[in-house]
Amino acid sequence: MKNISVHLHLYYEDAGSYLLNKLSKIWNGKIYLSLVHNNCANDILLSLANSMFSDIDIVYVDNKGTDQYGFLHSFKLNNEDTKWVLYWHDKHLSKKQWLDDLTDLFCIDENIKDIKRYTNDISSCGIISSAKCRNKALSFHQIAELSPYMAIEYRQNIVRSYHAIIWLKELQYLFKQKYNIYDENEIYPEFSAGTIFLARRDIIAKAHSVMHNNYFEDCYRADGDVGHALERFYHYVSKCLGYTNKFI
């Protein structure tokens, strides 16, 4: 893979080590790494990363929201004029199968041939992500239709789903205000759940340009924060800019 820069956000010692090992089999160049301030796994993760990659730019961030807060800040450090950005982050090892489903597409020779085709100079592709985790953002109406069937002990999931869509709508509004671009047909975009992808730099730059540090809440939430809206928003921005999104 050429003309890309690589970003990682790591938190867990075991899952982070697993991801670093996996990445090292396809990449040995520079990485942009975000870590959480004072996390006990940092020293081990950083030592392992230094043993595998030729150059590392590190940013330490507060434990806010999902991994996207780390990516937001590591991307600000990235001064390389690469056309593409590969973004990976770890998940708890209980979600190892999901992590593999998201990252395997970048490690299989047959898929790499497709990736090279989608990223050539004449391609209209904007984002490449996992077909195994392909999903579609639910509308308010669709969430309401699910509501009667949700048991009382799980009804917080309904509220969190509404929160994610409210944040998506807010980001779309801010994007329209800033760039005068809005796509009615893509307001509930298809996306790859998990926010691991290869994306054009201009998509990420424009998506991040409407973000603010204050949008991110402390600590992890299963759904419903701005980071979960952002995973959908990247794919929306790509479509607004005239690109296609490929799920492999």
Image: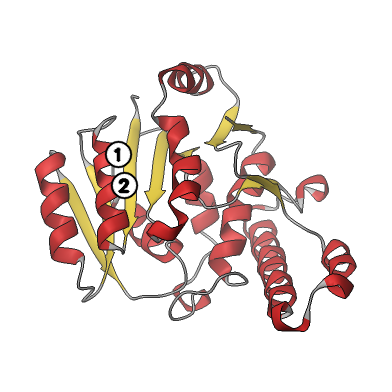
Distance in Å between CA atoms under marks 2 and 1: 5 Å
Image side of residue 163 versus residue 119, left or right: right
Q: As displayed, is residue 150 above or below residue 12?
A: below
Residue 19: which disc?
2
Residue at the image position 29 percent from the left and 29 percent from the top: 26
Quarter of the image with the N terminus in it: top left
Q: Which residue is mark 1?
A: 22
Disc 1 marks which amino acid? Answer: Lys
Quarter of the image with the C terminus in it: top right
In depth, the one of 45 and 211 nearer the eye is 45
Report x, y in % for residue 157.
Answer: 69, 74
Residue at the image position 47 percent from the left and 72 percent from the top: 65
Image side of residue 85 versus residue 237, left or right: left
Report x, y in % for residue 60.
Answer: 25, 67
Report x, y in % for residue 141.
Answer: 88, 65
Task: Identify the secondary structure beneath mark 2.
Answer: helix
Choose top left, top right, bottom left or bottom right for residue 131.
top right
Image side of residue 70 versus residue 188, left or right: left
Q: Are marks 2 and 1 in contact (CB under 8 Å)?
A: yes
Q: As displayed, is residue 46 above or below residue 82?
A: below
Q: Residues within 10 Å of mark 1 (few under 14, many from 20)?
A: some
Disc 2 marks which amino acid? Answer: Leu
Image side of residue 133 versus residue 86, left or right: right
Task: Identify the secondary structure beneath mark 1.
Answer: helix
